[in-house]
Image (cartoon, rainbow, N blue to C red):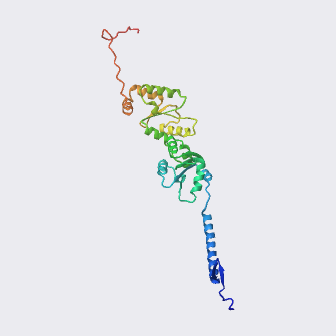
Amino acid sequence: MSSASCMDVRTFVNGRLESSSDVREAFSNDNKAVTNEIKSDEIKEVKVESFDLQALLEARPFLVLSLTNCPQCEDLKAMLVARGVPDEVFVKFDKADPLYPLQKKALQAYAGEVFTFPQVFSQGVHQGGFQAAAELLRSGAFDDVLEREYQVEPTTIQNWTQKQSMAIFSLPNCPQCDTLYEDLKKRGVPVHDVFIKLDKAKPEYSTFKAQLQKLMNKERFSFPQTFVEGVYQGNFDEVISKADEGSYADFFSRAFGLEPPAPTMFNEPAGGGEIEFDDDF
């Protein structure tokens, strides 16, 4: 090895006199920094993922998007789990996840610029937040999709009969329903609270009808249909007949605070004695 190759050459670098070994070390450190920066960028690039909400909606007929540490999310989940809804319908976001900004932006296209969690979709259609979804669940709007897609037994009709002391299921443009409505109204029954009007035009009607058939153990029936304290009472004429007989007197008093009607008093005809009739009367 020549002495020249071992010579430590000094050079001005950034206004300072540096040895060649110092320069080589600085260059090496710079290369390491550049290499580390590239690797760091590569790692960050690998972590960035896309979020396709539309694909998720197509894959799940019923979807609940929730957030960590969200009491309303847990409340809605408890309501759905109590019905037998499986865990696969729930997707939980995390604000600490680097993917969250993409998730939020995708959801804003449906829920608006400002929204709260949870957000619910049914068959790809946005249903709203907690309050809207909870009301739709109680009203039976999700019965059909939950039964068809997840084999969840619908119980909306049964829940109504158990929740209300008196539940009367009717239809629009139903003369018999109107007859029973007016009869009970005259007796003081709060008809606005006990009548539940179904609608054949709504998609959930078919499952409501099937639920009624099961509860009444009848394949064919007409409206209205009445339940008292969860027990089936019959058609409109049967209910009116029972009311006329006083069968509901105690129930009306207990449930609605209605006093039983006073017994009818018959005055004895003037002159006393029995009424006589001709033989051929």
Q: Residue furthest bottom?
A: 2
Q: Nearer the viewer, residue 11 or 224?
A: 11
Residue 123 visible in this rendered orientation of the protein: no
Residue 243 at x, y percent in the picture: 41, 27
Q: Nearer the viewer, residue 67 or 98?
A: 98
Outermost residue to the left = 272
Q: Position of residue 11 (x, y in %)?
A: 66, 82
Q: Residue 3's spot in the image, x, y percent?
A: 68, 91
Q: How many marks?
A: 0
At 57% from the left and 53% from the top, the residue drawn is 104
Q: Quadrant of the C terminus?
A: top left
Q: In terms of image quadrants, where is residue 165?
A: top left
Residue 255: image location, x then y, percent: 38, 33
Figure check: 205 above or below 77? above
Q: Residue at x 55, y 38 (%)?
A: 205
Figure check: 174 above or below 46: above
Q: Quadrant of the N terminus?
A: bottom right
Q: Nearer the viewer, residue 79 or 130?
A: 130
Q: Nearer the viewer, residue 114 or 223?
A: 114
Residue at the spot 62% in from the left edge and 54% down from the top edge: 52
Q: Is residue 12 visible?
A: yes
